[in-house]
Image: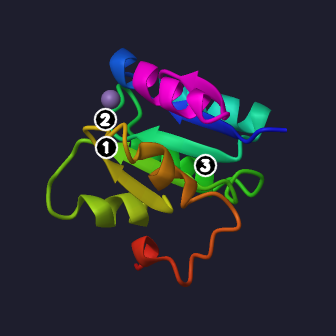
Amino acid sequence: MSSSILLIEDNEENRYLVTYLLRARGYEVVHAESGPRGIELASKLRPDLILLDIQLPGMDGHEVARRLKSDPELKAIPIVAVTSYAMVGDRERVFAAGAEGYIEKPINPETFVTEVERYFPPFDRETHPCSER
Ligand code: MN
């Protein structure tokens, strides 16, 4: 069975690109256009990994990550934030909210899937360079 990835992203172009890239490498991709819908689908489908946009209407990605990580049933699912915020402190905020990884937009089609794959379990939080807190 192929690994499943839940993509929480409100931007249609980004959804299209990410879905295309991941499906081309054999992943199952399900998407949600809002934070609450993303949490609902995470609960229902238990994906192997979650890709999370930070700039979302209503509930931002930090809040979505906090809620997912506070749920004992869902907290083991790795979360990779995909965000165009390029301000100092953003990585720290994303990790503080509970995400294991961080990929910057614009998405680079050449490297995106490889970057995502670094975060699939088994994921060693202790030794991963991006999870220093
Ligand atoms: Mn967005």
Q: Which mark is residue 100?
A: none
Q: Nearer the viewer, residue 4 or 95?
A: 4
Residue 3, given in percent of the width and then of the height, sits at 73, 42
Q: Residue at x 49, y 45 (%)?
A: 113
- Label 2 CB-ligand 1 distance < 8 A: yes
Relative vertical location of residue 133 with respect to residue 17 in this rendering, above or below: below
Q: Which mark is residue 83?
A: 1
Amino acid identity at mark 3:
Leu
Q: Which label sits in the foreground, 2 or 1?
A: 1
Q: Residues within 10 Å of mark 2 (few under 14, many from 20)?
A: some
- At mark 1, the secondary structure is strand
Residue 73, given in percent of the width and then of the height, sits at 77, 52
Residue 106 part of the magenta segment: no
Relative vertical location of residue 6 with respect to residue 33 in this rendering, above or below: below
- At mark 3, the secondary structure is helix
Question: Distance from label 3 to label 1 (Cα)?
Answer: 18 Å
Residue 118, given in percent of the width and then of the height, sits at 54, 61
